[in-house]
Image (cartoon, rainbow, N blue to C red):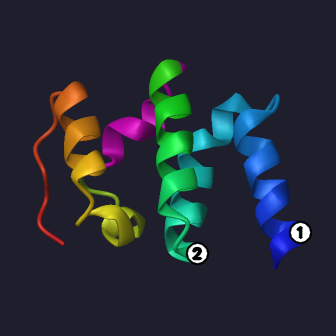
C-alpha cells in the first residue's frame, strides 16, 4: 500500500497536474487528509475545472467534515453541501 501512496503523491506533485483533484479524492478515501488537501491546493493553483464540483462530488464526502474543505469552497465561491 505504501508504494501505491507514493505513486499517487508523485502524480499529484509531478508532471500530472491535471489529475490533482482525482488524486485528492483518492487520498481522502485512503484517510490521508493532509495529502488530499495538498492535492486540492495544486488543483486550485492550476485552476482545474473538476475542482468546481468539489461541493457536489459524492467522493469528496470523506473530506466534507474538514474545515479546510470549507475554506477551499469559500475561495471558489461555492456553497458547502451537507455530507
Quadrant position of the N terminus in the picture: bottom right
Q: Nearer the viewer, residue 38 or 50?
A: 38
Q: Residue at x 55, y 66 (%)?
A: 32
Could you say whether the residue bearing mark 2 is in a helix, strand or loop? helix
Which residue position holds label 2?
30
Figure check: 39 above or below 48: below
| Residue 50 appears left or right of 4 | left
Q: Residues within 10 Å of mark 1 (few under 14, many from 20)?
A: few
Query: Alpha-carbon distance for marks 1 and 2?
Result: 13 Å
- Tell me what residue is drawn at x 58 percent, y 75 percent: 30
Counting from the top left corner in percent of width and height, residue 15 is at: 82, 28
One can see residue 75 in this view:
yes
User: Where residue 83 sits: x, y (%)?
Assistant: 18, 72
Q: In this rendering, would 51 be left or right of 17?
A: left
Q: How many marks?
A: 2
Q: Quadrant of residue 26?
A: bottom right
For disc 1, the marked residue is 3
The span shown in magenta is: 46-54
Camera-side residue of 53 and 61: 61
Residue at far front of view: 34
Amino acid at each position: 500500500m505504501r508504494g501505491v501512496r507514493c505513486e499517487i503523491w508523485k502524480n499529484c506533485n509531478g508532471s500530472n497536474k491535471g489529475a490533482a483533484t482525482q488524486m485528492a479524492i483518492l487520498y481522502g478515501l485512503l484517510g490521508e487528509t493532509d495529502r488530499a488537501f495538498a492535492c486540492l491546493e495544486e488543483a486550485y493553483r492550476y485552476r482545474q475545472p473538476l475542482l468546481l464540483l468539489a461541493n457536489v462530488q459524492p467522493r469528496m464526502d470523506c473530506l466534507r467534515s474538514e474545515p479546510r474543505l470549507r475554506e477551499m469552497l469559500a475561495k471558489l465561491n461555492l456553497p458547502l453541501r451537507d455530507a
